[in-house]
């Protein structure tokens, strides 16, 4: 009979359970890794599904409505999927390159079409996708006054209109120059008669008021109209306050020079008058009150005060030429010596070898400009050139020493 070994059994049991624990531990690790991988894969799939998700797009194309499902992520892509093409003059909202981010989007297409714009005797044919009358007028290169009216209708004869199916007619407002109790007003109106104008502008005539024309008279463009009240009355008008001018003399500028340093601006004031009217004529006027609205700005003018030298006289003396060039008389002798040796005082002198020209024999001749043979021009250039020698005396000494300057 074998002896029972309890200790051996215990060791075996412990070994068995340790092995089970190890297997379970590594199993949990593998399970967790798989779960993470599955979660990551699921997230990537969701992301891909979001980017490739179908979008519901409703397209309104020139009065027709169409709804599609698309994977496109731009307006242009959605229109391509729908088989819809657009022209350059068409207007698409949102724009073709706009991104589609929502699951449901509306796209509007406004097709360009020919429209005849009638402005008085002018007819302008324009191709535009503009929808409002104001935008159509703008596309035709015209401007509207707020009082002008427009009417967009279909044309009766498409061939006569050059293929245009729509016509926009502009009815221009008329201009009326109204003097109302002494105040001059310029009005724009669609009124047919003077009575209509008074009603439109909410002008009510008192029993003592008079009007220059009958109220049933037709309104004409640039019509003059006057309303006045008999007897004494007050009127308020806005008047200009003339600006003053300040003149500053500048001895460095010729007398012919006049420069505006600061532009003048008229001021404004509101003036109330008491006037007396009789038979539609103003008999007397007296100022009873005034209020300054804006102060005038003084105009500042720079005026040259430098005495002008004598003008160039081809038959003048050397002294005349030197004075005209602005050379001081005390330098005349130096100038006479240098010029006499350079060109012999011949304004047309030109050195065939070097190309030097004029009284100073300047090289290149282009230094003197196109009028190089004008002695005043030549001497004026020379008067500035000798500053490198400290003036005419220094230029003279240099010439005596080196026979050039």
Image (spheres, grey):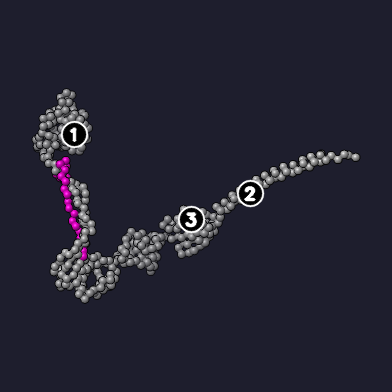
**Mark 2: which secondary structure?**
helix
Q: Are marks 2 and 1 in contact (CB under 8 Å)?
A: no
| Among the two numbered marks 2 and 3 on one chain, the one whose residue lies closer to the N terminus | 2
**42 sits left or right of 380 in the view:** right
- Please name the residue shown 13% across and 69% down the image: 283
Q: Position of residue 69 (x, y in %)?
A: 54, 59
The residue at which mark 2 appears reads as 38
Let me know if residue 229 is in the magenta part: no
Q: Can you see residue 232?
A: yes
Q: Judge by depth and name the residue closer to the eye, 295 or 283.
A: 295
Q: Nearer the viewer, mark 3 or mark 1?
A: 1
Residue in the picture at 22% in, 67% down: 178
* Image: 393 above or below 172: above
Query: Which label's residue is closer to the chain start, 3 or 1?
Result: 3
Of tags 2 and 1, which is closer to the observer? 2
Q: Which mark is residue 156?
A: none
Check disc 2: other Cα within 10 Å, few if <14, some if 14-19, many if 20+. few
Residue ID for mark 1? 384
The residue beneath circle 3 is 75
Between residues 161 and 11, which one lies in front from this camera angle? 11
110 in relation to 2, above or below:
below
- Residue 254 in the image, given as x and y percentages of width and height: 15, 42
| Quarter of image, res 205 | bottom left
Point 15% across, 44% down: residue? 249
Q: Main secondary structure of the magenta part?
A: strand
Residue 309 position, x and y percent, is 12, 40
Q: Quadrant of the C terminus?
A: top left
For label 3, count other residues whose C-alpha is less than 10 Å away and answer few (under 14), some (14-19) or many (20+).
Answer: many
Q: Name which of mark 2 and mark 1 comes first in the sequence.
A: 2
- Magenta range: 236-257
SS at circle 1:
helix
Q: Furthest-top residue in view?
A: 401
């Amino acid at each position: 009979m074998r002896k029972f070994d309890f200790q051996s059994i215990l060791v075996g049991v412990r070994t068995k359970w340790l092995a089970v624990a190890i297997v379970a531990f590594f199993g949990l690790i593998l399970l967790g890794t798989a779960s993470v991988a599955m979660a990551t894969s699921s997230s990537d799939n969701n992301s891909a599904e979001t980017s490739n998700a179908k979008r519901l797009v409703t397209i309104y194309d020139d009065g027709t409505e169409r709804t599609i499902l698309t994977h496109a992520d731009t307006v242009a892509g959605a229109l391509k999927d729908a088989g819809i093409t657009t022209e350059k003059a068409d207007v698409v909202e949102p724009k073709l390159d706009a991104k589609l981010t929502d699951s449901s989007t509306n796209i509007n297409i406004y097709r360009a079409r020919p429209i005849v714009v009638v402005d008085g005797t002018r007819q302008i044919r324009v191709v535009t996708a503009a929808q409002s009358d104001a935008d159509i007028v703008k596309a035709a290169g015209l401007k509207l006054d707020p009082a002008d009216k427009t009417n967009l209708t279909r044309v009766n004869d498409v061939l006569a209109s050059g293929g245009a199916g729509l016509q926009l007619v502009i009815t221009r407002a008329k201009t009326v120059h109204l003097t109302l109790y002494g105040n001059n007003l310029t009005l724009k109106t669609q009124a047919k008669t003077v009575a209509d104008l008074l009603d439109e502008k909410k002008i009510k005539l008192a029993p003592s008021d008079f009007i220059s024309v009958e109220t049933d008279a037709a309104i004409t463009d640039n019509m003059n109209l006057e309303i006045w009240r008999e007897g004494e009355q007050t009127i308020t008008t806005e008047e200009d306050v003339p600006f003053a001018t300040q003149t500053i003399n500048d001895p460095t500028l010729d007398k012919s020079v006049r420069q505006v340093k600061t532009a003048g601006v008229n001021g404004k004031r509101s003036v109330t008058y008491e006037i007396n009217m009789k038979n539609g004529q103003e008999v007397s006027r007296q100022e009873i009150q005034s209020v300054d609205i804006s102060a005038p700005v003084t105009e500042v003018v720079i005026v040259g005060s430098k005495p002008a030298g004598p003008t160039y006289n081809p038959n003048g003396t050397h002294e005349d030429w030197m004075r005209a060039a602005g050379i001081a008389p005390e330098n005349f002798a130096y100038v006479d010596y240098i010029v006499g040796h350079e060109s012999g005082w011949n304004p047309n002198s030109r050195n065939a070898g070097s190309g030097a020209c004029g009284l100073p024999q300047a090289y290149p001749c282009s230094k003197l400009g196109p009028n190089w043979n004008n002695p005043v021009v030549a001497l004026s250039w020379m008067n500035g050139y000798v500053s490198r020698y400290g003036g005419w005396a220094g230029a003279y000494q240099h010439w005596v020493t080196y026979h050039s300057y």
